[in-house]
């Protein structure tokens, strides 16, 4: 049996690694674009009314401020059809940090406020687990949820079962 998935790949601009998206054309039809902060997909999920946009991003820790500035300055966060999937390189809420650290990233408030201003909902599992840890044990252990799945509230209302 041969799988005929569609694949879209870009290198991380100026950084190690990159982004890859794959989807089964049986459930969706997307066109991918390399854009200023990652991969932007525009298309339709079969059986759903209207087009959706999926922005898959990677925010390198060292350049998080630049990343956020670009993300908001291009107006993409104004799309009511947007799903943002991302490694943000920082957490959105305090409950996304495990371990002995009490340090709060100054970017958290700015990014969280911007998401609320643009009517985005943070989608996460009820039994949330970290997506990154520092590899240490005991008192030196720190783990965080850095990967996010955010959806505009208007699009969220169109999905009956997220």
Image (tube, rainbow, N blue to C red):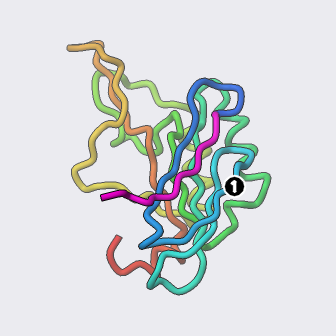
- Reading the image, the residue beneath label 1 is 33
- In the drawing, does residue 39 fall left or right of residue 95? right
Question: In the rendered structure, which segment of residues is drawn in magenta?
Answer: 1-11
Give coordinates of residue 19: x percent, y percent. Answer: 56, 41
* Horizontal arrangement in the rendering, residue 152 relative to residue 79 (left or right): left
Q: In which quarter of the image is the N terminus?
A: bottom left
38 and 150: which is toward the camera: 38
Tag 1, which secondary structure? Answer: strand
Give the residue at x 27% y 47%: 128
Q: Residue 32: x and y, percent?
A: 64, 58
Up-down relation of residue 24 to residue 11 (above or below): below
**In the picture shown, does residue 101 fall above or below 20?**
above
Local packing at callout 1 (Cα closer than 10 Å; few below 14, some 14-19, many 20+) is some
Left-right relation of 67 to 93: right
Which residue lies at the image location 69% right of the left edge and 39% below the top edge? 67
Question: Between residues 10 and 95, which one lies in front from this camera angle?
Answer: 10
Residue 2 lies in the magenta stretch: yes
- Name the residue: 46% across, 60% down: 23
Q: Which quadrant does the C terminus fall into?
A: bottom left
Give how far across and how far down residue 7 sits, in percent: 53, 52
Residue reaching furthest to the right: 73
Furthest residue in direction front, as rendered: 1
């Amino acid at each position: 049996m041969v799988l005929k998935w569609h694949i879209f790949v870009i290198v991380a601009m100026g950084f190690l690694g990159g982004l890859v998206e794959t989807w089964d054309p049986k459930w969706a039809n997307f066109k991918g674009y390399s854009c200023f902060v990652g991969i932007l997909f525009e298309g339709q999920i079969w059986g759903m009314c209207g087009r959706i946009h999926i922005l898959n991003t990677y925010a390198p820790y060292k350049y998080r401020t630049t990343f956020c500035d670009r993300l908001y300055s291009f107006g993409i966060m104004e799309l009511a059809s947007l799903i943002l999937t991302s490694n943000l390189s920082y957490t959105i809420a305090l409950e996304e940090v495990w371990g002995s650290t009490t340090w709060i990233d100054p970017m958290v408030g700015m990014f969280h406020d911007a998401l609320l201003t643009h009517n985005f909902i943070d989608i996460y599992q009820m039994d949330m687990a970290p997506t990154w840890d520092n590899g240490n044990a005991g008192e030196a252990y720190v783990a965080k949820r850095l990967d996010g799945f955010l959806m505009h509230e208007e699009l969220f209302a169109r999905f009956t079962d997220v």
